[in-house]
Image: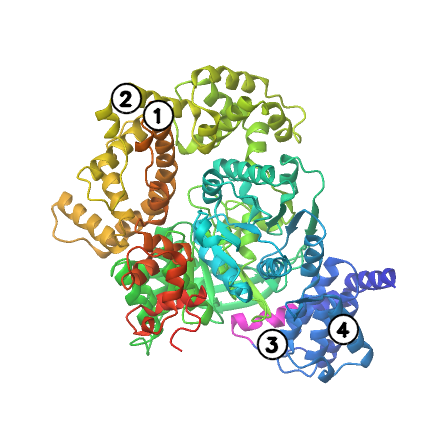
């Protein structure tokens, strides 16, 4: 039967009559984009429906995708047709039950279908149904396959398109896993960036709500024996935070989930991620590991680096929502300026959709905005920008092309605009463009604001959202339309093919849209042509890339005994050198090289190994200390140790010990500057006087100063330096972006890394010379990453709160509260006095922290 279904589907697909009908269907389903009205003959609709039923019964994924596209297109052309039950059945036959229920939500018994189809669909649905805590959940075929593999194997690799339901599946799996265990479990969910932590933590907190009395979900890398005793722990961490918790505790993880696992190819951070996975597996050999990637990447290459030979791979190329790649070109002169749209079809000629006339400019630097304004009128639209400054500029152009909103005063948009002005700056671009229903989203934004923007976009308050490459890191922001023009990833050049497909996958929202549109403006002029490259490629771990194709860079770095640390272009070389140096210490360097070069059998690393071995005699620091700081060259760490040794007198070394940021110590700022100066000179190996600025900046940040006050201070300083009374609004917006960038890239990443190393080596030296009592310093790196040092603030963030929310809430709480006490306090009636911003209240609701409050 399966063979017959496949052959029938092949015959249908190859039929010229079918291809002609399909082309007409696709064109008619998209004609509203250019102002037309969909028209399709009843007979043709029926024939296409019959063809889709046959295609859906094939076992070939390609046929399933085609059947799904037909069903969605027919729904777009005939939203009120009595055949919706048939189209629902087609989607159900492909295993896409959520889409089928969206097309027709009537119970199966009420659908106008032959009884044989009803029985078949019911049986199909039963196959994909699981019971979790007494609730029946219907999975897609892809989800059901992953579910089976997770319950039967230790290592699972999942590759699927955006919106395939991966997050929901993981949440459901963890709920089932934790509900059915009699012992406590430790789980870590790894995300590629801080911007994703809140989203994932909020989602897990909500999903695990039935187990709230015995499960703690946290994003702070600390284990509190008193608070966490007898409870399962679910951590949502970046690899940096995972390394911290591995360094500071003996925790063993039962389950490790690596989201966006292709990030293991991200230079030095990829090396760190690999090291964390190795350590987690070394501590518990039975740890279950799940690697998740978009459909354009396959993470099966990670397992061999961990010494794992058996990994179960589940792939899905079928997108749950139909996605149209649309080429957009502009031509003509006023008053006959035209925007033409053509549909991309794999291995076929482009299909002309139509043209629309525009009065707007079609100059080269205006086409992206003009296309978005003319073609994005239906549904929410994402417009891609390559950098934050570009995003602000594009958002301003979009806003200028839109009319004033009639009901802006006292609207949700006004409230958000005022909130942005209060917490960032009134001249910040987002505060202004919200007045026209335009938003901006990039990684530097404070979490409370970025989540409010996402929610407003999801609710329809924001019609156009300008985004940067944060979308590539898994931020959940699907939209009806996405507009791209020669897309780049910051200063790194054009998007790679897998990044393009990851981004394009955001078009179309499951259970909301029949399709998503990806508009490619001036595609023929792009620096790269990613549309033609749809193949799934293996993830290339950065250590394999470094030894296999970039070994000369690593060798040059290793042979330079006076190399620097923290140089952006040398980040990969430094991290690989450090990794090999440590492996040489414990005798595993040959194994590391062998595993990394498994796919490069003709490449030798003997010269590199010799250089690493030659550097060993220059470093006396213990391996355990060096391993805690695995992204910083051991030679540079030794240099800092030598600096401390040369100044080991009581008075001099005491002046280098850091004190609590909120202490009344008269030398707190001076000591911070001293630490930064030592970092710059001895760890990084560079000459700079930046310690004065960053010493103040770091202290203010850790003491809980608001982002707005930090920006105001920067503007005031710049005015004083320029001897001016005021700046243009654009200049102030630029300063705001710079301060946010320094917070994210310098304070919360760069200096967290180096201050941790500074304190580790200083502590080692103090203990070495018998001054153990002075070695107990506060956790400055944690304070710096969180932007808080007061116990209540830190505890609030442990519950998942953003910095803005924690600061607002802490105003009403005692200074020394632990996380559980805060949780109980938030549920008291007094908290509903309306003194807390509604955006903060909404954040607390998403985290499940206000359940029962006000009742």
Task: Give the magenta range.
Answer: 25-36
Q: Secondary structure at mark 3?
A: loop
Checking the image for residue 765, the label placed there is: 1
Q: Kindly tell me whether residue 484 is visible in this rendering.
A: no
**Of the pair 200 and 227, the residue shown nearer to us:** 227
Query: Could you say where residue 630 lies in the image, as x and y percent from the top left?
Result: 47, 32
Which of pointers 4 and 3 lies earlier in the amino acid sequence?
A: 3
Mark 2 burial class by Cα count in 10 Å: few <14, some 14-19, many 20+? some
Which of pointers 3 and 2 lies earlier in the amino acid sequence?
A: 3
Q: CA distance from mark 4 to mark 3?
A: 30 Å
1 vs 4, front mark:
1
Q: Quadrant of residue 364?
A: bottom left
Q: Secondary structure at mark 4?
A: helix
Q: CA distance from mark 4 to mark 2?
A: 77 Å
Q: CA distance from mark 3 to mark 2?
A: 81 Å
Q: Are marks 3 and 1 in contact (CB under 8 Å)?
A: no
Whether residue 32 appears in magenta in the rendering, the answer is: yes
The residue under label 4 is 121
Q: Quadrant of the N terminus?
A: bottom right
**Picture layout, residue 72 above or below residue 327:** below
Q: Are marks 2 and 1 in contact (CB under 8 Å)?
A: yes
Q: What is the chief secondary structure element of the magenta stretch?
A: helix
3 vs 2, front mark:
2
The residue under label 2 is 648
Q: Secondary structure at mark 2?
A: loop
Mark 1 burial class by Cα count in 10 Å: few <14, some 14-19, many 20+? many
Which of pointers 3 and 1 lies earlier in the amino acid sequence?
A: 3
The residue under label 3 is 38
**Of the pair 278 and 569, the residue shown nearer to us:** 278
Q: Secondary structure at mark 1?
A: helix
């Amino acid at each position: 039967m399966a063979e017959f279904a496949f052959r029938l589907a092949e015959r249908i697909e190859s039929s010229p009559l079918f291809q002609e009908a399909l082309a007409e269907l696709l064109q008619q389903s998209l004609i509203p984009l250019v102002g037309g009205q969909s028209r399709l003959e009843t007979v043709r609709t029926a024939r296409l429906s019959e063809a889709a039923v046959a295609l859906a019964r094939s076992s070939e994924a390609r046929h399933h995708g085609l059947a799904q596209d037909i069903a969605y297109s027919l729904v777009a052309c005939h939203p009120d047709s009595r055949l919706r039950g048939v189209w629902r059945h087609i989607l159900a036959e492909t295993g896409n039950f959520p889409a089928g229920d969206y097309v027709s939500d009537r119970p199966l018994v009420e659908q106008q279908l032959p009884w044989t189809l009803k029985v078949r669909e019911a049986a199909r649905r039963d196959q994909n149904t699981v019971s979790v805590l007494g609730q029946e959940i219907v999975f897609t075929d892809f989800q059901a396959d992953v579910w089976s593999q997770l319950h039967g194997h230790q290592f699972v690799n999942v590759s699927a398109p955006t919106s395939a339901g991966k997050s929901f599946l993981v949440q459901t799996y963890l709920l089932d896993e934790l509900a059915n265990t009699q012992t406590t479990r430790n789980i870590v969910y790894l995300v590629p960036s801080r911007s994703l932590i809140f989203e994932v933590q909020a989602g897990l907190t909500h999903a695990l709500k039935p187990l709230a009395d015995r499960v703690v979900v946290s994003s702070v890398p600390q284990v509190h024996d008193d608070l966490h005793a007898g409870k399962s722990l679910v951590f949502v961490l970046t690899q940096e935070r995972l390394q911290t918790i591995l360094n500071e505790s003996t925790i063993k993880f039962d389950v490790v989930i690596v989201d966006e696992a292709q990030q293991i190819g991200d230079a030095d951070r990829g090396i760190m991620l690999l090291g964390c996975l190795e350590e987690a597996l070394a501590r518990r050999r039975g740890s279950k590991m799940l690697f998740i990637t978009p459909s354009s990447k396959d993470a099966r290459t990670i397992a061999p680096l961990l010494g794992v030979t058996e990994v179960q791979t589940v792939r899905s190329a079928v997108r749950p929502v139909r996605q149209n790649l649309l080429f957009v070109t502009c031509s003509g002169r006023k008053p006959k300026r035209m925007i033409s749209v053509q549909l991309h079809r794999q291995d076929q000629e482009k299909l002309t959709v139509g043209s629309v006339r525009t009065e707007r400019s079609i100059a080269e630097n205006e086409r992206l905005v003009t296309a978005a304004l003319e073609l994005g009128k239906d549904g929410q639209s994402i417009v891609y920008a390559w950098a934050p400054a570009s995003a602000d500029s594009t958002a301003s152009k979009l806003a200028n092309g839109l009319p004033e909103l009639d009901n802006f005063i006292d609207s949700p948009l006004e409230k958000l605009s005022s909130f942005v002005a209060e917490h960032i700056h009134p001249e910040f671009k987002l505060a202004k463009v919200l007045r026209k229903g335009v938003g901006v989203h990039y990684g530097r934004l404070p979490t409370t604001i970025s989540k409010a923007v996402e929610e407003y976009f999801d609710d329809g308050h924001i019609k156009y959202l300008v985004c940067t490459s944060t979308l590539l890191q898994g931020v959940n922001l699907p939209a009806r339309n996405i507009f791209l023009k020669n897309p780049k990833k910051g200063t790194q050049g054009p998007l790679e093919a897998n990044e393009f497909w990851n981004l394009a996958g955001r078009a179309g929202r499951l259970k909301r849209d029949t399709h998503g549109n990806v508009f490619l403006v001036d595609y023929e002029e792009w620096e790269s042509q990613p549309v033609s490259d749809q193949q799934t490629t293996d993830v290339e771990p950065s250590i394999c890339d470094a030894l296999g194709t970039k070994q000369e860079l690593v060798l040059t770095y290793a042979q330079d005994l006076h190399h620097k640390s923290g140089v952006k272009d040398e980040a990969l070389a430094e991290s690989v050198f450090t990794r090999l140096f440590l492996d040489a210490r414990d005798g595993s360097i040959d194994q590391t090289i062998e595993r990394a070069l498994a796919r490069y059998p003709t490449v030798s690393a003997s010269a590199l190994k010799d250089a690493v071995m030659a550097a060993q005699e220059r470093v006396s620091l213990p391996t355990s200390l060096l391993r805690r700081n695995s992204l910083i060259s051991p030679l540079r760490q030794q240099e800092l140790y030598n600096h401390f040794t040369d100044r080991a007198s009581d008075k001099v070394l005491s002046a280098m010990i850091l004190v609590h940021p909120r202490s009344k110590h008269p030398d707190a700022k001076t000591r911070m500057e001293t630490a930064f100066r030592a970092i710059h000179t001895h760890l990084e190996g560079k000459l700079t006087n930046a310690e004065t600025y960053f010493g103040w900046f770091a202290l203010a940040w850790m003491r809980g100063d608001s982002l707005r006050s930090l920006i105001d201070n920067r503007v005031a300083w710049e005015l004083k330096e320029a001897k001016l009374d005021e700046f243009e609004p654009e200049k102030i917006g630029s300063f705001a972006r710079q301060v946010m960038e320094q917070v994210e890239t310098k304070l919360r990443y760069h200096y967290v890394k180096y201050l941790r190393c500074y304190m580790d080596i200083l502590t080692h030296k103090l203990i070495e010379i018998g001054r153990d009592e002075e070695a107990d310093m506060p956790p400055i790196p944690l304070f710096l990453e969180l932007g808080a040092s007061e116990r209540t603030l830190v505890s609030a963030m442990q519950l998942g709160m953003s910095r803005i929310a924690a600061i607002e809430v802490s105003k009403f709480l005692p200074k020394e509260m632990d996380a559980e006490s805060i949780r109980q306090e938030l549920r008291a009636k007094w908290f509903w006095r309306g003194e807390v911003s509604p955006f903060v209240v909404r954040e607390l609701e998403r985290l499940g922290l206000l359940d029962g409050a006000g009742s």
